[in-house]
Amino acid sequence: MISICDEQPITVEGQKISVSLTTGCSSRCTVIFGHGAGAGMRHASLDAIANAFADIGISTLRFNFPYMEAGRNRVDSLSVSIQTFKEVYSFAVKKELDPLFLGGHSFGGRMATHAVVEHKLMVKGLILSSFPLHNPKKPSLERASHFDKIECPILFLIGTRDGMANADLIQQLSVEHQATLKWLDTADHGYKTLKRTRTRQDDVFQEIAVYTDAFVSEILKQH
C-alpha cells in the first residue's frame, strides 16, 4: 500500500512550499527528490518514479521549489534552489526519515549536486535522473565543475536518446568521479521510450527501479 501526504511545512525565502512523501509497506531509506524545471512535484514521471521506488522499499520525499509553488515560470536562483534542498533535508531529518539519499530529475538533480557541496548534507548518495549535463547540442562539462567536491556515491540514470547528456562526456564524468552510470533503453530526457525498438520487457520506470535498487542496496550494505 502506497501512502501519500501533502502539506506546506517548509518556508523558503518567505514562500511556503509543498512536500509529498510516497512510501510503501516498508521503507529502508528515503530519497529527497527535486522536480525538473518545467513541471512540479506532481508530474506524471515523478509519480511513476516515486511509485516504482516504493515497490523496492525506498520512500520518496518530493517538494516544489518556491518558483513552482508560486506559479512562476522562471526557476529560482542557485542559492534559493540549494537552500530549498537544505530546508527539505532538515525537515526529513526532523521526521527521522533517514538514511537519506538526495536527487532529482533534470534541474532538480543538478541542484541536488550543488546542495551536497554547499551545505555538506549528510546523505548516503545522489540519485540523478536525466542529469542535464549541458544544453541540447552544446556538449560541455562546465555544469559538472563542482563534482570534485562531491564526497558521496553518485548514480546517473540517463536515457540513450537524452540530448542533454553527451554519451562520451557523461561516460568521462562517471569514470573521473567513480559514479555509477546506467543507460535507459531508448529513453529521451523526459523518459519517453521507443516501443518498437526498446529491447527490455519492463517499462522505463521499472528499469530505473532495478538500477536504483542495486545502487542503494550496495551502499546500505556497507553501513
Image (cartoon, rainbow, N blue to C red):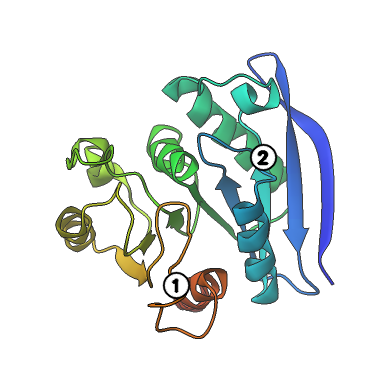
Where residue 62 appears, x then y in whole percent?
A: 66, 46
Tell me if mark 1 has few (under 14), some (14-19) or many (20+) residues whose alpha carbon lies within 10 angstroms of its own.
Answer: some
What amino acid type is highlighted by mark number 2?
Phe
Q: Residue at x 80, y 32 (%)?
A: 8
In this rendered view, identify the residue nearer to me: 134 or 176: 134
Where residue 72 appears, x then y in whole percent?
A: 61, 19
Could you say whether the residue bearing mark 1 is in a helix, strand or loop?
Answer: helix
Asked if one can make out residue 95 in the rendered structure from this viewpoint, the answer is no
Could you say whether the residue bearing mark 2 is in a helix, strand or loop?
Answer: strand
Q: What is the number of the mark on residue 63?
A: 2
Residue 2 located left or right of residue 81: right
Reply above or below: 210 against 208.
below
Where residue 109 appears, x then y in whole percent?
A: 45, 45
Q: Residue at x 56, y 42 (%)?
A: 35
Pick the quarter of the image with the N terminus.
bottom right
In this rendered view, identify the residue nearer to me: 93 or 127: 127
What amino acid type is highlighted by mark number 1?
Phe
Residue at far front of view: 196
Q: CA distance from mark 2 to mark 1?
A: 23 Å
Q: Residue at x 46, y 19 (%)?
A: 77
Instruction: Indicate which disc, 2 or 1, sits on the residue closer to the N terminus.
Output: 2
Residue 54 located left or right of residue 219: right
Reply above or below: 168 against 19.
below
Residue designated by label 1: 215
Q: What is the number of the mark on residue 145?
A: none
Foreground disc of the pair 2, 1: 2
Q: Residue at x 68, y 56 (%)?
A: 47
